[in-house]
Image (cartoon, rainbow, N blue to C red):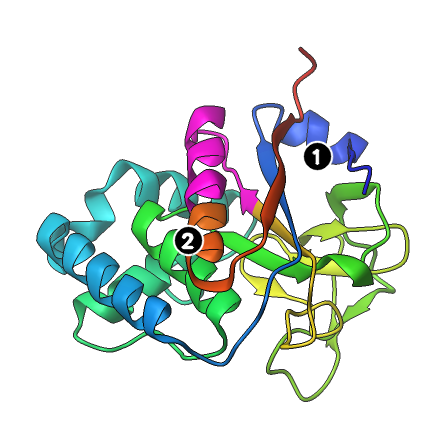
Amino acid sequence: MQVNVKWGSKVSASFSELAICIGLMNSVHVERENERLCELKRTVYAEVKAKHDVEALKENPTVRAYRDFYWKLGIDPTKTRPSGEALLRRVLHGSELPCISTVVDAYNLASMKTIIPISGFDGDCLYPPFQVRFARNDEAFLGIGMDKLLPLSDKMLVLADEKQILCVYPYRDSDYTKITEQTRNVIIVGYGAPAIAEKRLEEAVGTTLAYIKDVSEGEIAMVKVFSCKPK
């Protein structure tokens, strides 16, 4: 699959330092759960519990960067938390992450560990090039777990392809492109914020693909950062 990212003119004007990282993985074998995933969860849970204190989390530079970005987008990050922070808080409070499938659980673990919001999509349901843009007021979106369409506004940042919105940036993914046990080719997206270095995004997506390979096999085909700012 040829992957490219277009940036909306309003996004470029408002957030010139924004970037995303895209990773491709082919020939994965998605299962509900397996022992490799269980072991990975135990390892990553122990790592984040040893590293982070939930009371001090709001002062973490990565958490702070996404919270500041949310405020600029008109989202209250204390009510709608960036996904990496939300997953990390859940585990630090003593709960488990949701058990969805080997691939989804693997990218949630990577998002929790890196605190970078990460999406995973069924690559065979996508129509690149991708676009990071503001939504139109006449658009609607059905996210995973939603029972009705969400009307969007032109203040909401989205990731889209040529046919559909894939994600309300960067916290809710589309139900139509979600990973299932029939998925064989996966696209991973690491979402940046203006204060997040491109190297952090690349490392987060690299970690995600390594986790997926560990629990679901597959072959890594690409990891690439796409920056809003011209090189």
Q: Which mark is residue 11?
A: 1
Q: Is residue 39 left or right of residue 106?
A: left
Placement of the N terminus among the 4 image quadrants: top right
Q: Residue at x 51, y 52 (%)?
A: 118
The image quadrant that residue 11 belongs to is top right
Depth order, front residue of 179/166: 179
Q: Are the two marked residues, 2 and 1, in contact with CB atoms closer than 8 angstroms?
A: no
Placement of the C terminus among the 4 image quadrants: top right
The amino acid at mark 1 is Val
Q: Residues within 10 Å of mark 2 (few under 14, many from 20)?
A: many
Which residue extends farthest bottom?
147
Where is residue 207? Give x, y as percent. 41, 44
Q: Is residue 155 visible?
A: no
Q: Label 2 belongs to which residue?
A: 211
- Secondary structure, mark 2, is helix
The image quadrant that residue 43 belongs to is bottom left
Q: Residue at x 50, y 63 (%)?
A: 216
Q: Which mark is residue 21?
A: none
Q: Residue at x 78, y 34 (%)?
A: 4
The amino acid at mark 2 is Tyr
Q: Residue at x 46, y 49 (%)?
A: 208
Decide which of tag 2 and tag 1 comes sooner along the chain: 1
Q: Is residue 54 visible?
A: yes
Give, as a single range, the part of the protein colored magenta: 190-207
Q: Residues within 10 Å of mark 1 (few under 14, many from 20)?
A: some
Where is residue 224? Give x, y as percent. 62, 30
